[in-house]
Image (cartoon, rainbow, N blue to C red):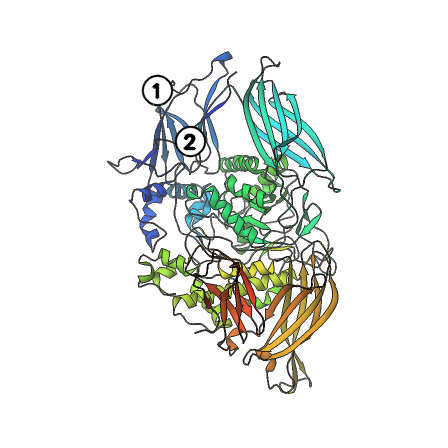
Amino acid sequence: MSPRTVIPIDKNWEFRQADKEHSKFLPVAQFPTNVHLDLLHHGLIPDPFIGKNELDVQWIGEAQWTYKTTFKGASVPKNGGGGKAVLAFDGLDTFAIVKLNGNTILETDNMFIPERVDVTSLLKGEDEDNELVIDFDSAYLRGWKLVEKYPDHKWGCWNGDNSRLAVRKAQYHWGWDWGPTLLTCGPWRPINLEIYESRLADLNVESTVPEDLKSADIKVTAEVEGKADKVRFEISLEGKQVASETVPVSSDKATASFHLENPSLWYPIRYGKQPLYQVKATLIAGDGDDNSEEVDTLEKRVGLRRAELIHRPLKDQPGKSFFFQVNNIPLYCGGSDWIPADNFIPRISKERYHDWVKLVADGNQFMIRVWGGGIYEEQAFYDACDELGILVWQDFMFGCGNYPAWPALLESIKREAHENVKLLRHHPSIVIWAGNNEDYQYQESVSLTYNYADKDPQNWLKTDFPARYIYEKILPEVCSELIPSTYYHPGSPWGDGVDTHDPTVGDIHQWNVWHGTQEKWQNFDKLGGRFVSEFGMQAFPNVKTIDAYLPLGKNDPDRYPQSSTVDFHNKADGHERRIALYLVENMRYGPDPLEQFVYATQLMQGECLASAYRLWKRQWKGPGREYCGGALVWQINDCWPVTSWSIADYYLRPKMAYFTVKREMAPVSIGITRTEHRHPKDRYTRVNVDVSTRVEVWGSNLTLEDLEVDCVLKAWDVETGEQTFNEVVAEKIVLPENRSTEIDAREVPVIAGGGKDQEKRTVVAAYLIDRKTEKQIARYVNWPEPLKYLHLQKPKELKVVLSEDGNAVEISAEVPIKGLVVETEDDAVVFEDNLVDIVPNEVVRIGVKGATKETKLEARYLGML
């Protein structure tokens, strides 16, 4: 029996516009590809990421396109008549008709389903050319035809338009409130020709780690197509084999079970290492040593871990917990939501995926949520999460709408779920699958029928919210079959069928800062939930990113914050009012120069997101008191250069919020809140009132060791720079492991006789000092708010210098400085921290890479202009 042969069909591809007369075939830019990349390659369209070019390329999504190639045939084994030639299409976007040598072999309508077609009878011989032609129809127009075909469905959505709900294609292609409308088509994933008599169709590795973590049971199953006799399973770690067994094939399957003592367990970042076992299956034909042949191999990298989502009653509060636990370690899951990293997926390299996940890991984050309006991501993305210890919350691809449920569509969705769960289930990083993004919230917003007590799925299909059948029957059944040990959650947000805004159960999306009631971010402590899987604040991207999308760069007449082009690169409804609202509530700012306005929005975002992480992490108080189990900021990344909620822009340039989040998610941190208390001396008086301003101090210890610390509190007058307080307010206190602990509460320290409203100009800083090392391990500076009321002083002795060893920037000043940013024109210079607060008599060190003595360092801070 001959070994399986895989021949990539990635050469000689050409494309043309099919519905344009006399359109000529042109070579593609790359493969896999899509039509926008190919048109860009030939200069036939302007770059849609520049200026307002997006408007000039909308015709592409309403046209028809043809891709074709020729490839040499192959000899199909004739032994026993079992030889096959199969064309494997990993992904076609979206409505495609595929022809081989003039014969229609496949019609597709789902971007997410890989397809396999037996072409044995159609494939020409080894020295002959085979022609493969793929015709792509307009997904946009086909979508509207389907909307018209099903008029009884109650169509409706947020973002894009109703046609997207009818099409199984990445929903963000229709445009979102952070991304352009660019309706792509094309062969977006690889195409291969496979020649074989027998093959390994799938390799599944199921592992169980008991509570004592001292062993692991591994069940390995290979699905076999064709006639073969045996499968040899091998498990290795770091190149050393730890287990092996050869088993016979029976009923097209082979299964082996292994028991490992003292296995190397996979841990999330910070809490341990990420060892990955290599599981290899080798398909063997023949029943003896002399006549045995290895005909196929398949390998998967897996991590052994015990992962749980913990729901249990809480002490002192209603509802129940929602937090992740890996290898018996409860985790406060600080992290980010993820959207596709480009509108044109085929050009995202493996290296770029790794760089994005590395950025998350370096930012002290533990989890990425793959949002339901994008794609089931590339293997390179999950590989990076496996390697770096980042947990993945995986949505199924439904978002912000009322999806239809006609029978053929349900069957397609079932196949989609089945195929993608099988493709991704070996990744140890994936700890939860969720049915959709905000579809239950959409249902609530337009009062669609949802009776949680009705458990009859057939009844759900008869309501005006038939998609419940998808989220509560199809998807959980697929998960139960294929990944029974991974938690399935019907949607995000969702909690036991109650209102999705209920903070006491399940997860919530907290958009009452920015959207909704537009609350102050200082009130995030009152806006939390058991797990906050979305929240956010917008900020402009790096000035270099803005210059990159302006047609004339730095010389563009639209190079100012409120320009038509800059506004075009913000897709959020009402963004002008919301950015202006949160800026004007909190700080003094001006629109000029552009650099200072960008700084103001990034300071605003940094303060906002840090406040959320700090206040919600305070509610992680130990066993039975996990009042908030995690927070995922919307969003880590962008799909094009834009003003959005991202904390790093399209070019992987971190915004300042990236660094404030990084500090808040450090292993040990300290927080302060400041509140005003009014105590009327008489029942009805508005005059005879005692007013006090108090600060509360707490420490958050996310390590797995108790820490003995001292807490130091200092204070300064923001106008004079005079120090007004410096005391150890708590000595030899213990911060228990993996929780937040209250430390101190007092009135804002002021100097007796210092004048009226002294507390309103007093900056308070808190420090944790490790008793063992006598080193500072946490620092936080709290300012009177709103910042716009402060009479900030410009420093006369500001120093921003590179350290002698070149590994840090050292910053000091004689007066308090709010939000100092270190900048340089050199993109090779990478700062490990930024947007720092400076107080007198301290030197703040920011780690830096790539800087030299010739590097020009500049500082920007609040009130400098």
Q: Residue furthest front?
A: 804
Q: Secondary structure at mark 1?
A: loop
Residue 107, numbered label: 2
Whole-percent x and y of residue 518? 52, 66
Dot 1 alpha-carbon crowd within 10 angstroms: few under 14, some 14 to 19, many 20 or more? few
Whole-percent x and y of residue 697? 67, 69
| Residue type, label 1 | Glu
Q: Does 464 appear above or below 96?
A: below
Residue 837 visible in the displayed image: yes
| Residue type, label 2 | Glu
Residue 152 visible in the displayed image: no
- In terms of depth relative to the viewer, which is nearer, 109 or 13? 13
Taking the spot 50% from the left edge, 70% from the top edge, the residue there is: 799
Q: Does 100 appear above or below 711?
A: above
For marks 1 and 2, the one nearer the N-term is 2
Residue 128, numbered label: 1
Taking the spot 36% from the left edge, 41% from the top edge, the residue there is: 35
Q: Gap between marks 1 and 2, in whole Å?
A: 25 Å
Say whether residue 363 is left or right of residue 600. right
Quadrant that contains the C terminus: bottom left
